[in-house]
Image (tube, rainbow, N blue to C red):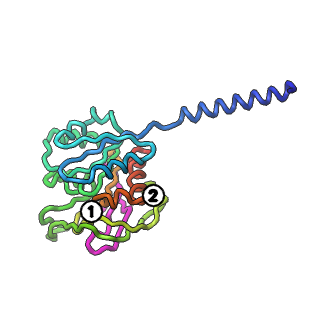
């Protein structure tokens, strides 16, 4: 082998070695997710199997009544994203203040399905999530509305509003069997992500917005294994987690 050829070969090896090191150096660590549950039964095994399938994500579960101790600015250093899959009511003033501080500091939040009905007497939670499932009569623009509704095992079509948004990118309109919610509140400033024409459902069924410095996504879908095993739903939840984490 000539000296020139040997030199070129050594330079190539050095380049490949440096490239490999650069790739390793820039590899993102897994997104650490805290899943909050409690107050509503669900199919645990298929739900958590969905999270185990998500690339680049690790998770742990915390159940009420112990969850509020983890939803503080100090405890929040241990995870990157909160996923709410609870339907809980009691919350102290101290826990409210800590949760708001955590979100105003920029912690990502994904709220799923029945979490829309949590904290019925805490109005700030409605602003955090971007909507509310009302257990009692409520008023909208001065008009009294009946309580929100639900319907199990409905087969319906879901429409993607903005296929360019990071949460819905690569997802086409899809069919799903799931529980629908009707007559729930959606705040006007949220960005709709999914809609449906199903009569038992609100039209807007997923949205994104910001609260303080936090990105927030709410997805109404997700009652049981029919949703958890739906490929479009899985991708939706995975991309929502990545987006609120800033990935």
Residue 106 visible in the snapshot? no
**Does residue 191 belong to the magenta stretch?**
yes
What label does residue 186 carry, if any? 1
Asked where in the image residue 101 lies, by quadrant, the reply is: top left
Q: CA distance from mark 1 to mark 2?
A: 19 Å
Q: Is residue 74 left or right of residue 5?
A: left
Label whose residue precedes the other's in the sequence (1 or 2): 2
User: How far across and how far down the image is residue 81, in percent?
Assistant: 34, 43
Q: Secondary structure at mark 1?
A: strand
User: How far across and how far down the image is residue 23, in percent?
Assistant: 58, 35
- Please name the residue shown 20% across and 53% down the image: 41
Q: Secondary structure at mark 2?
A: loop
Crowd class of label 2 (few under 14; some 14 to 19; many from 20; radius 10 Å): some
Q: Would you place residue 132 above or below residue 64 in this image?
A: below
Crowd class of label 1 (few under 14; some 14 to 19; many from 20; radius 10 Å): many
Q: Would you place residue 136 above or below residue 235 in this image?
A: below
Q: Is residue 22 left or right of residue 166?
A: right
Q: Is residue 139 left or right of residue 46?
A: left
Q: Which residues are magenta?
A: 186-211
Which image quadrant: the C terminus? Answer: top left
Q: Is residue 3 left or right of residue 119?
A: right
User: Residue reaching furthest top?
Assistant: 3
Q: Are marks 1 and 2 in contact (CB under 8 Å)?
A: no
What label does residue 165 carry, if any? 2
């Amino acid at each position: 082998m000539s000296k020139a050829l040997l030199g070129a070969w050594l330079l190539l090896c050095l380049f490949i070695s440096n490239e490999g090191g650069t790739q390793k150096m820039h590899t993102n660590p897994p997104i650490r997710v805290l899943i909050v549950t409690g107050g509503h039964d669900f199919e645990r095994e298929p739900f958590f199997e969905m999270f185990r399938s998500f690339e680049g994500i690790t998770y742990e579960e915390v159940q009420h009544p112990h969850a509020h101790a983890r939803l503080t600015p100090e405890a929040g250093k241990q995870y990157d994203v909160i996923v709410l899959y609870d339907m809980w009511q009691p919350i102290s003033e101290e826990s409210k203040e800590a949760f708001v501080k955590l979100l105003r500091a920029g912690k990502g939040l994904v709220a799923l399905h029945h979490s829309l009905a949590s904290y019925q007497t805490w109005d700030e939670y409605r602003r955090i999530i971007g909507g509310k499932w009302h257990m009692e009569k409520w008023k909208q623009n001065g008009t009294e509305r009946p309580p929100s509704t639900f319907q199990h095992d409905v087969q319906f079509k879901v429409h993607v509003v903005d296929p360019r948004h990071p949460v819905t990118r690569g997802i086409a309109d899809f069919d799903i069997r799931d529980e629908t919610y009707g007559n729930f509140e959606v705040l006007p400033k949220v960005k709709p992500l999914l809609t449906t024409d199903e009569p038992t459902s609100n039209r807007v069924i997923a949205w994104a917005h910001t609260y303080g410095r936090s990105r927030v996504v709410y997805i109404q879908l997700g009652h049981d294994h029919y949703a958890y095993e739906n490929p479009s739903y899985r991708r939706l939840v995975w991309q929502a987690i990545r987006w609120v984490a800033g990935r």
